[in-house]
Amino acid sequence: MSKEDKEAHTKTTFERAIEDRAPSKGSVTARAEQVARETGKLNPLVDPSQFGVIRRSLPRFVALPGGFWRMAIGTPIPVKTRIDTTGSMGGNVDIALRVLPYNWEMVNLVLSRYDVQMATGIFGDISDHFVICDPQFEMDAKKIVDQIMMLVPERAGGDTPEDPHYGLFGAAYLTAAYINRIELEGYDFTVSDAPARDRLLKGQLIRIFGDEVFARVEENGFMIDPNNLPTTVEVVQDLLKISHAFFIQINQASETRQFWTEVFGEERVVFAPRTELLPQIQTAIIGLTEGTLELDGIVESLMEKTMICKGRDRDNKPILERVDRTDAKLVMRAVSGIPIGAQAALPNFDRIAIKDDIFRNKTDLWPMTAEEVAAEVELPEEDGKAIKWVV
């Protein structure tokens, strides 16, 4: 494995990608916003109607002699975040990119046995030109950074409720993830300060996902009657069958909490004191759900292992501080009511495929046994060359 491959899961790789690719001044999405204004279109990589509409999270394999396949990193696990960019939340994409290296590092600490595949998108209102931006699941730092910079926040305000439920529809019915085939779940986060609407509109679904949206939903194994669409509550109930999904609230408005509590349930609505603490909150939620963190150890873990980005200096370098005890306690209180250990309680939690397991076919559910590998597979010697990923 090459040096670059070994660094795939490090904060340094993401810091380097941001330094090389993001503008040193101004909004990181300025170029994408300009192109969208000129063309009336999103970049296909973040356009929910493009790339087959269905978003896929699949294993990464290395081809072996004899037609066998070696799992390169581990079982893939999707981590999707959709961020509110309406009104006062309009700067959230810049914050998301600023904290991305720390978010990636922390999530990988609590998901170390998996191949983390991340998709960070945004949502606005149906009155906007682009209701949602929905990127692909990626694991490469450069691609993740590029896709975040392709997002087009319109920053419009004055229209409440908002429309993240179209993104939730895509997550529930237009996601195909290997992790669900083995009866485990990925992670899904909606970040906002406002309630949504109770109902989807057929015309808006076609506008957002394209004319073939209902055919793609059926292709993905779901039957949705275009003339009898699920409510927002029903969409989330279906999403919870395939994802550990949470709503992260960026204020304490009672109307917002009441709406999302009715949609997700009280145990899945989490209050975030500040947007900058999203990486810590998401990490705590994932770690508690997986069983890789314990509630009474979160404060010390966060203080010891995580940093918070509080802006940039005159040279545009991140201003970093160690998470202090006050913030760590706020995070602990925020996540204390979630379903702890929910992933660990699912079938096959202790059975997942890991790095270097051998598969007979790329589409197989489980790897070959050690006896089958010994009898049938001729493993090549490591030659130090870079791996070519095959999905």
Image: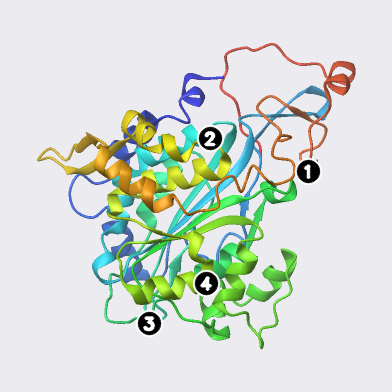
Task: Inspect the image, locate mark 3, and give the three-letter code of the amino acid beneath it.
Answer: Ser
Number of the label disc, if any, that sits on residue 127: 3
Q: Nearer the viewer, mark 1 or mark 4?
A: 4
Q: Distance between the residues labelled 3 and 2?
A: 42 Å
Task: Inspect the image, locate mark 1, and give the three-letter code of the amino acid beneath it.
Answer: Thr
- Which of marks 4 and 3 precedes in the sequence? 3
Q: Residue at x 40, y 37 (%)?
A: 298
Which element type, helix, strand or loop, lies under badge 1?
A: loop
x and y percentages locating residue 312 in the rendered image: 17, 42
Relative depth, front residue between 300 and 85: 300
Q: Is residue 53 visible?
A: no
The residue indicated by pointer 1 is 363
Which element type, helix, strand or loop, lies under badge 3?
A: loop
Task: Inspect the image, locate mark 4, and give the three-letter code of the amino acid beneath it.
Answer: Val
| For residue 28, above or below residue 258 | above
For the N terminus, the image quarter is top right
